[in-house]
């Protein structure tokens, strides 16, 4: 299996799925399956977790022994 550090990196990278999540949320909201308050909370969560991806990777990659190339912004 993966090490704890690599598993954490993989988990962080899975948070980049926000575009698909927003599409599914919009369809669910339009069909009336998701109330407006829940829709709003889930949209905010999708945006926040996606924004957190870069900074978290910047912290986790060096801890796992991976190098971040010079000039690459997270």
Image (cartoon, rainbow, N blue to C red):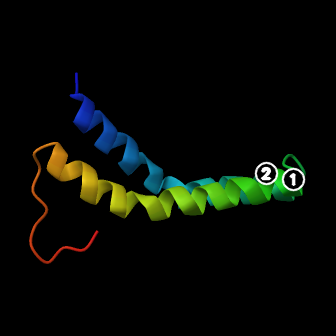
Using a 10 Å C-alpha cutoff, classify the residue at mark 1 as few (fewer than 14 neighbours), some (14 to 19) or many (20 or more): few
The residue at which mark 1 appears reads as 31
Extreme residue in the top direction: 1
Q: Is residue 59 left or right of residue 62?
A: right
The residue at which mark 2 appears reads as 28
Instruction: Tell me the SS state at disc 2.
Output: helix
Question: x, y percentage for residue 62?
Answer: 15, 51
| Residue at x 13%, y 62% (from the top left corner) | 68
Which quarter of the figure is the N terminus placed in?
A: top left
Question: x, y percentage for residue 25?
Answer: 72, 54
| Residue at x 22%, y 27% (from the top left corner) | 2
| Residue at x 61%, y 53% (from the top left corner) | 21
Of residue 5 and residue 20, the one placed in the foreground of this image is 5
Instruction: Tell me the SS state at disc 1.
Output: loop
Location of residue 30 by image quarter: bottom right
Extreme residue in the bottom direction: 71
- Image disc number at residue 13: none
| Residue at x 26%, y 54% (from the top left corner) | 59
Of residue 16 and residue 49, the one placed in the foreground of this image is 49
Report the Cα–Cα distance between label 2 and label 1.
5 Å
Circle 2/circle 1 CB separation < 8 Å: yes
Q: Is residue 51 left or right of residue 41?
A: left
Q: Is residue 61 above or below residue 22?
A: above
Q: Is residue 51 left or right of residue 38?
A: left
Q: Is residue 48 above or below residue 71?
A: above
């Amino acid at each position: 299996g993966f090490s704890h550090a690599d598993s954490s990196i993989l988990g962080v990278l899975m948070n980049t799925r926000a575009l698909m999540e927003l599409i599914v949320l919009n369809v669910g909201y339009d069909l009336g399956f998701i109330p407006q308050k829940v829709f709003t909370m889930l949209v905010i969560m999708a945006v926040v977790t996606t924004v957190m991806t870069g900074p978290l990777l910047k912290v986790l990659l060096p801890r796992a022994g991976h190098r971040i190339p010079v000039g690459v912004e997270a």
